[in-house]
């Protein structure tokens, strides 16, 4: 197969996957919502050129209106602008931590599942240690020892989130490594790199994509909780907006907390719906069924 034919084959596969994914209208709508949200965060400087620090004199705590669809805060700032700029922080941490979780979990699971024996035992004991680390208490320790920063928050969330993916990948690799075509490759003298990157990793992509899209909502909710509790540095994020809104709830400024909360809820729900769409598209035998990821993986191992 020539390089051009290979590219055409890849494009055809990607097109077929998208058509299958688009059959799930909820997942397609969630994908569109996330694309719009991401573009809004990226181009917030152009959509809201005055920035999040723009004050409107004598417009403090105004409810939603045509001039301010999401109302204004206690300083007279446009809540829509604040939520758009806050999306930058939340999405940056979500995608960064989700990506690191996917890389660490996939690498550890592949190595442990392929080599087995002592290597598997050592890596799984390390995984067990990280599984016992609670995220919020660990954040408290990090804040007490070091200066609170978004980098520290991102690292703690990632380090406490990758063990679950490592176990999932390992269990699938253990089953896949026993397949006949893998054994033939070994007998023919194929190297470890070829087996892992040519066979094992491509066959794990459906699990990786689905699990990553499921873990990102957890990252978003964890980050929002940390910001809400004041354990993170002062940064414009949805959790921080909910934090400062509590002081004004008694004055009836419900919009200060409702709209950031809806942003968190909508984004988390969108990632979950996308994971369901990916699961149906990548595993056709489960389309239109409500099986959980665990059931899907159990059936794949049979």
Image (cartoon, rainbow, N blue to C red):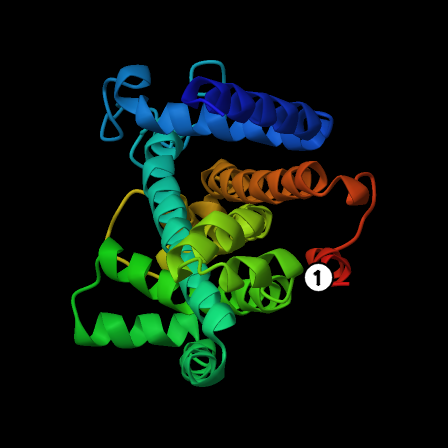
Relative horizontal placement of residue 8, taking residue 50 as reference (left or right) = right
Task: Judge by depth and name the residue closer to the eye, 162 or 4.
Answer: 4
Mark 1, residue position: 294
- Answer yes or no: is residue 210 visible: yes
For mark 1, give the secondary structure: helix
**Residue at (33% x, 42% y) in the render:** 92
Relative horizontal placement of residue 256, taking residue 142 as reference (left or right) = right
Task: Judge by depth and name the residue closer to the eye, 86 or 113.
Answer: 113
- Answer yes or no: is residue 161 visible: no
Relative horizontal placement of residue 17, taking residue 4 as reference (left or right) = right
Task: Judge by depth and name the residue closer to the eye, 166 or 63.
Answer: 166
- Crowdedness near tag 1: few (<14), some (14–19) or many (≥20) residues, C-alpha within 10 Å: few
Q: Quadrant of residue 265?
A: top right
Image coordinates for residue 144, horizontal then vertical, percent: 22, 75
**Residue at (35% x, 33% y) in the render:** 82
Image coordinates for residue 53, horizontal then vertical, percent: 22, 30
């Amino acid at each position: 197969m020539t390089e051009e034919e290979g590219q055409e084959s890849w494009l055809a596969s990607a097109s077929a996957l998208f058509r299958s994914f688009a059959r799930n209208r909820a997942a397609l709508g969630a994908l569109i919502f996330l694309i719009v949200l991401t573009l809004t965060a990226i181009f917030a400087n152009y959509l809201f050129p005055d920035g999040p620090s723009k004050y409107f004199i004598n417009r403090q705590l105004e409810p939603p209106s045509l001039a301010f669809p999401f109302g204004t805060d206690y300083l007279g700032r446009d809540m829509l602008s604040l939520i758009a700029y806050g999306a930058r922080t939340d999405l940056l941490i979500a995608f960064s931590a989700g990506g690191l979780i996917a890389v660490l979990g996939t690498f550890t699971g592949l190595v442990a599942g392929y080599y087995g024996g002592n290597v598997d035992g050592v890596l799984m004991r390390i995984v067990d240690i990280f599984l016992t680390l609670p995220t919020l208490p660990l954040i408290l320790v990090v804040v007490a020892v070091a200066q609170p920063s978004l980098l520290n928050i991102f690292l703690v969330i990632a380090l406490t989130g990758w063990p679950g993916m490592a176990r999932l990948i390992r269990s699938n690799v253990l089953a896949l490594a026993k397949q006949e075509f893998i054994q033939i490759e070994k007998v023919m003298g194929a190297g470890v790199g070829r087996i892992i990157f040519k066979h094992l990793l491509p066959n794990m992509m459906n699990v990786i994509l689905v699990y990553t899209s499921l873990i990102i909502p957890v990252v978003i909710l964890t980050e929002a909780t940390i910001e809400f509790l004041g354990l993170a540095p002062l940064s414009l994020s949805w959790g921080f907006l909910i934090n400062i809104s509590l002081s004004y709830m008694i004055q009836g400024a419900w919009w200060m907390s409702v709209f950031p909360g809806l942003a968190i809820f909508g984004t988390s729900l969108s990632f979950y719906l996308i994971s369901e769409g990916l699961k149906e598209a990548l595993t056709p035998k489960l389309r239109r069924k409500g099986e959980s990821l665990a059931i899907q993986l159990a059936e794949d191992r049979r």
